[in-house]
Image: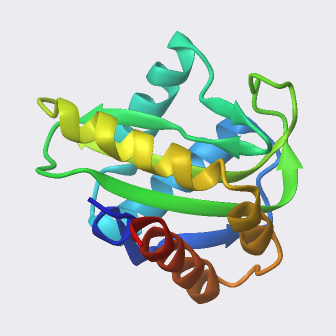
Amino acid sequence: MDLGTLLKPEAVKVVTAASSKKRLLHEISDLVQQAYGLDAHLVVEALMSRESLGPTGVGQGVALPHARLDGIDEVKGAFILLDKPIEFDSVDRQPVDIAFALFAPEEAGVEHLKALALVSRTLRDTAICSKLRANPNSATLYAILNEAKSARAA
């Protein structure tokens, strides 16, 4: 598994108008509806339900919101870079400007965990995060994320 199998170019976006965690979750939902045809209302409900169990802000400005959904057959991802960090109840209490969301089938077991681990490992790399933050262009962000998986595999 690599980031290229989780993420389509259409599922990468720079967002300038998210002012809250809730607004970011709505932006993610709209993005996955456009990129994968998923129901945005169901997606945002699933994300909010998961967040109610505990925040998915993992620190260093990164959030990994994730949820299980009916009607999908493989793990799918969406990446958002925010132009201004927002409060996200992160473990380190720092605001978030990078969000990589994952969606897994309801019955997905280990694949969901493997995808979460891969994204987490990738975004713990401060050099990769610095590159992402320095390049607010969707196509460039997608290329950086794909380079990251190639470099990690080497």
Image vertical order of residue 42 relative to residue 8, above or below:
above
Specify how the rendered protein is coloured: rainbow
Tell me residue 58's x, y (percent). 66, 32
**Front residue of this view, candidates 12 and 146:** 146
Left or right position of 19 against 29 = right
Q: Quadrant of residue 21?
A: top right
Quadrant of res 20: top right
Q: How many labels were placed on the picture?
A: 0
Of residue 28 and residue 141, the one placed in the foreground of this image is 141
Q: Position of residue 69 (x, y in %)?
A: 24, 37
Q: Residue at x 85, y 39 (%)?
A: 95
Residue at x 83%, y 76% (from the top left corner)? 134
For residue 11, above or below residue 1: below
Q: Quadrant of the C terminus?
A: bottom left
Residue 120: x, y in percent? 53, 44
Q: Is residue 18 above or below residue 67?
A: below
Q: Report the front residue among 13 and 91.
A: 91
143 sits left or right of 80 in the view: left
User: Which residue occupies the foreground of this view, 121 or 9?
Assistant: 121
Residue at 66% across, 36% down? 22
Q: Residue furthest front?
A: 154
Q: Quadrant of the N terminus?
A: bottom left
Question: Where on the picture, by quarter, is residue 43?
Answer: top left
- List x then y, in percent, for residue 153: 39, 67
